[in-house]
Image (cartoon, rainbow, N blue to C red):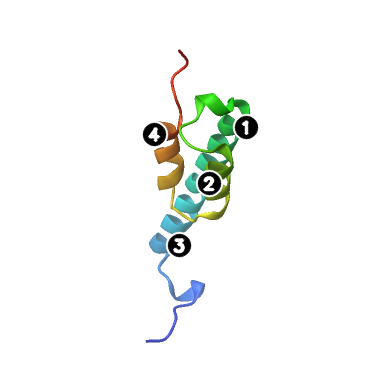
């Protein structure tokens, strides 16, 4: 099966890809900013591991959402 080129995709598919990429990028930026602001004891796990994963893993927005739901500890 031959690879599809960008020009071969329907306008709807192109729009979905662009919107998904923009949402993923925005979520990653907000998650990384939040992570930088927090002390190590306010994060479940290593800040370095979270930062590396958020920066390098292409997750379509899933990993930043996991960080916000599970990676942060509530202030005591």
Q: Name the residue tied to disc 2.
A: 54
The percent position of residue 54, horizontal first and vertical second, equals 53, 46
In the drawing, what numbered circle is on residue 14?
A: 3
Q: Residue at x 39, y 34 (%)?
A: 70
Q: CA distance from mark 4 to mark 3?
A: 32 Å
Is there a contact, CB below 8 Å, between mark 1 and mark 3? no
Q: Residue at x 40, y 40 (%)?
A: 66
Do callouts 2 and 3 mark residues in contact (Cβ within 8 Å)? no
Q: CA distance from mark 1 to mark 2?
A: 12 Å
List x then y, in percent, for residue 52.
57, 48
Q: Residue at x 53, y 38 (%)?
A: 46
* Disc 4 to disc 2, C-alpha distance: 14 Å
Q: Secondary structure at mark 1?
A: helix
Name the image quarter holding residue 29: top right
Identify whether 61 is placed above or below 45. below
Instruction: Check the image and name the residue furthest to the bottom.
Output: 1
Marks 4/3 in contact by CB < 8 Å: the verdict is no
Mark 3 lies on a secondary structure that is helix
What residue sits right under mark 1 in the picture?
36
């Amino acid at each position: 099966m031959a690879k599809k080129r960008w020009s071969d995709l329907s306008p709807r598919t192109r729009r979905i890809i662009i919107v998904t990429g923009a949402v993923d990028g925005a979520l990653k930026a907000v998650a990384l900013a939040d992570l930088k602001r927090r002390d190590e004891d306010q994060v479940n796990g290593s800040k370095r591991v979270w930062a590396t994963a958020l920066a390098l893993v292409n997750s379509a927005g899933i990993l930043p959402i996991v960080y916000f739901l599970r990676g942060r500890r509530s202030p005591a």
